[in-house]
Image (cartoon, grey):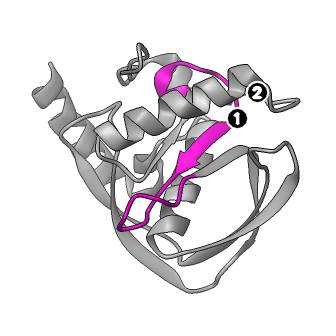
Amino acid sequence: MSKRAFIPWPDKRLRTPAQEVPEITDEVYGIWDDMIEMMDAMPGVGLAAPQIGVMLQLAVVDASEARNKRIRLANPQIIERSAKMNLHEEASPNLPGVFAKVSRPRAVSVRYLDENGVIARGEFVGLEATSVQHQIDHLAGRMYFDNISKTKRDMLLRRAKKLNG
């Protein structure tokens, strides 16, 4: 089991943009492997490195039913968004016990550095697209609740404070 831990909200690292990854190294692979282990243990469909205190633009996503479609992303950038929106329930292990329905584009095209250090373009739809966008938000220092109304966000954060002390 990974020795890493989720950093708790409101740790300032969750509001700090992560740094670009210049190349894929053994260290990057080790971080990705830890992240996949933690994502599976949640269980969740994605994880961004800042959530575990690693301030690099690294993310992992696996929204497949069989949990066998691991996608490792470095420096992901959305280059196209669909006009059609989807509503998904989103949450974060950094703020346990609360969730919100968030509207995001149903499909996105993303440019990223893949596990081989090659610039790739991925097409993501549905829950996978939601997860990729959620992780890219984390890499930019944003949380999923930044995408809901101020009233709903305030209620969510009050509820989280009660639950998590």
Q: Residues within 10 Å of mark 1 (few under 14, many from 20)?
A: many
Q: In the rendered view, would you say 152 is above or below 88?
A: above
Measured as percent of width and height from the top left, residue 109 is found at: 73, 70
Q: Where does the C terminus fall, quadrant-wise? A: top left
Residue at screen point 60% across, 42% down: 59
- Left or right: residue 115 versus residue 32 is right
Pointer 2 with pointer 1, Cβ within 8 A: yes
Q: Which mark is residue 19?
A: 2
The reply to whether residue 22 is in sight is yes
Q: Does the magenta stretch include residue 54?
A: yes
SS type, badge 1: loop
* Vertical placement of residue 35 versus 5, above or below: below
Which badge, 2 or 1, is on the more N-terminal residue? Answer: 2
Q: Does the magenta stretch include residue 133?
A: no
Amino acid, disc 2: Gln
Q: Nearer the viewer, residue 71 or 83?
A: 71
In the figure, residue 120 lies in which quadrant?
Answer: bottom right
Residue 11 as seen in the image, left or right of residue 116: left
* Residue drawn at point x = 65 percent, y = 81 percent: 82
Q: In the image, 134: left or right of 94? A: right
Start and end of the magenta stretch?
50-70
Per the image, the residue denoted by label 1 is 57
Cα distance between the residues tagged 2 and 1: 6 Å
Question: Which residue is at a point 35% across and 48% down the rendered structure image?
Answer: 44
